[in-house]
Amino acid sequence: MTPEATPGPRPGALISREQLAEDLRSLGLRRGADLLVHCSLRRIGPIDGGAETLLDALLDVAGPKATLVVPAQTTLNSLTSRDFHAAVAGLDEDERARFVAAMPGFDPARTPSHGMGAFAEYLRTRPSAVRSRHPQASFAALGPGARACMSVHDLDCHLGDRSPLGWLYAAGATVLLLGVGYSACTAFHLAEYRLPWVPPVQVYQCFTDEEGTPVMREFTAPALDDSDFVRLGAALEAITPAVQRQGRVGSGTGRVVPLRSAVDFGVSWLTIHRRRSYPGQSLWHFPYSRACAYHGPSTDGAGRGTRL
């Protein structure tokens, strides 16, 4: 089974909460394990009750001590995202100016995620959910560790150690891929921040909501690249088969892999396979590994493939 493959429709009626829970247990999901969930609800459905039923099944299996985390990225408030460039392609100068003038600012309490799927958006909107404050690469979480996990997300550290990924790595969390392949695995981006050379950087521009007014935020951060994540995932499965498990969940494929294993393997694999892209760079000279190092909870907030 390839990293992007799915097993095909499950015959019979809508998939129940009980069937999903059985599938997740068979996949090897551990009770009490903190989870980073990437999900295509359409590919594992049709589910009786949709996202609500899937969340209930996950909680049935993982239990009340588990923290569930989903990506909640936003791209429609950014002047540098792929989605923005696609939206303004072909517009003249006046049309582009009107489009930009109507762009919303990011408000962690109200701004919907974009392109993250129906399950991620459902979890984000639960009354007890907590969201990180990064205006482009936020996450949302439920559970006892949600507030701690979301407390650190620096503006110039989209998906590095000073993002919720750093907390998840330290907590020994598990990556759960439901109906999606490794191209969606944001944990691999944490590996990018740990590569042993100076990374390419870019200027990012996005709007945040300041008392109802969109305010431009501009910052410099590593240029993230998910173009080889499918190959990285295939290598992870081929070289370290014991660390990950896969099987049917609903009508699709589920995968579980320890987040630390995914990140550590990613550092090794990307160091070998991307080094040719950085000729002449000195190894072990990566300022962002220090700038984005996780130092525990803070209160300053922000200050897939990536769609940023």
Image (cartoon, helix red, strand yellow):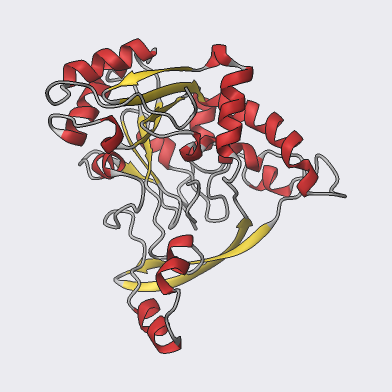
Residue in front for this viewpoint, 196 or 233? 233
Residue drawn at x 61%, y 41% is 228
Residue drawn at (30%, 57%) of the image: 111
Q: In the picture shown, does residue 30 fall above or below 236?
A: above
Location of residue 234 by image quarter: top right
Q: Residue at x 71, y 51 (%)?
A: 199
**In this view of the protein, can residue 295 be seen by the observer?**
no
Q: Residue at x 84, y 49 (%)?
A: 279
44 left or right, relative to 53? right
The image quadrant that residue 151 belongs to is top left
Q: Position of residue 220 (x, y in %)?
A: 62, 62
Tell which of 238 and 78 is nearer to you: 238
Residue 95 picture location, percent across and down: 38, 84
305 or 204: nearer the viewer: 305
Q: Is 110 situated above or below 87?
A: above
Task: Give coordinates of residue 101: x percent, y percent.
Answer: 36, 80
Frontmost residue, 153 versus 47: 47
